[in-house]
Image (spheres, rainbow, N blue to C red):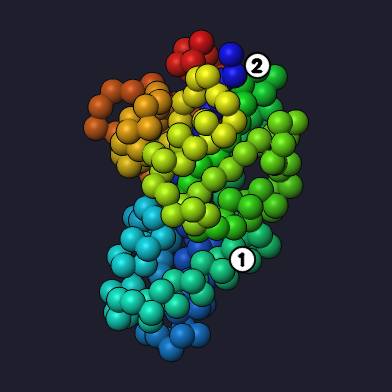
Amino acid sequence: MKKGVIFDMDGTVWDSSEGVAKAWTVKIHEAGYTDRFVTKEDIQSVMGKPMDVIADTLFTYTEKGPERDALRFSCENYENEYLTENGGILYDGILETWAKLKEMGYHVYIVSNCQAGYIESFLTYYKIPYGTPDDLVEDIECYGNNFLQKDENIRLIAERNDLTAACYVGDIQSDYDATVKAGFPFIHAKYGFGTINTEVPYINSFDELTKVVPEVLG
């Protein structure tokens, strides 16, 4: 049996909203929209959505198409640079809990709806080894790499790593919906950005996963 715990990013392992808002505002101003700003609250309100949906939500003052896409790509690229250098707010107990889960025989992965390079920015800033079975985080996948929806990327990670059982840890309703669609159990990070419309296993702090994951996966 190979059991995996797949993690969402924003609102589950960290909060990068303030840094993202600063980075995006810089690029918006550089593009000539000097009277426009992106706030931390704006970013938090769209966390977890695919990047094209986020751009359609926040950049309504641009023309949909090449203009909006160019602004979005500029913001995404600078966001990755900014977070690689400055990081975000890492929730308590993340690295220690991942290490403990590995000791318990579980395998750790990340799946997000973010742009390409975003997860790598997080891992690089915190110097988290990733990419091989011996690393703390064994594999990652995101919307920006393949333009697949989250449920498809959850299944992709499970299949690519030959998991016989897996669960997804996320904080918002769309995380739960994607997990159900993918056919896996879900654990709600209740300290994150959203609520879930049904009763599910949950954690109030990240370190509680060492108790909840065995209850969900055995």
Q: Viewer-nearest of labels 2 and 1?
A: 2
Q: In the figure, residue 19 lies in which quadrant?
A: bottom right
Q: Position of residue 184 (x, y in %)?
A: 40, 25
Q: Which residue is found at the position 52% from the left and 14% from the top?
A: 214
Mark 2 packing: few (<14 Cα in 10 Å), some, or many (20+)? Answer: few
**The N terminus - image quarter:** top right
Q: Position of residue 97 (x, y in %)?
A: 62, 28
In the displayed structure image, the side of residue 26 where residue 149 appears, left or right: left
Q: Which residue is found at the position 41% from the left and 60% from the top?
A: 51
Looking at the image, residue 2 lies above or below residue 48: above
Number of labelled discs? 2
Return the disc, 2 or 1, that comes first in the chain's sequence.
Answer: 1
Looking at the image, residue 161 lies above or below residue 147: above
Q: In the figure, residue 2 lies in which quadrant?
A: top right
The residue tagged 1 is 82
The residue tagged 2 is 104
Q: Which residue is found at the position 46% from the left and 31% from the top?
A: 168
Mark 1 packing: few (<14 Cα in 10 Å), some, or many (20+)? Answer: some
Residue type (three-letter) at the residue carrying disc 2: Met
Q: Nearer the viewer, residue 30 or 136?
A: 136
Q: Is residue 191 visible?
A: no
Q: Position of residue 134 (x, y in %)?
A: 75, 31
Looking at the image, residue 98 lies above or below residue 17: above
In the displayed structure image, the side of residue 17 where residue 97 appears, left or right: right
Q: Nearer the viewer, residue 20 or 64?
A: 64
Alpha carbon distance from label 2 to label 1: 35 Å
In the displayed structure image, the side of residue 39 where residue 108 appears, left or right: right
Q: Look at the numbered disc 2 and give the secondary structure of its residue.
A: loop
Q: Look at the numbered disc 1 and give the secondary structure of its residue.
A: helix
Q: Position of residue 36 (x, y in %)?
A: 37, 79
Residue type (three-letter) at the residue carrying disc 1: Tyr
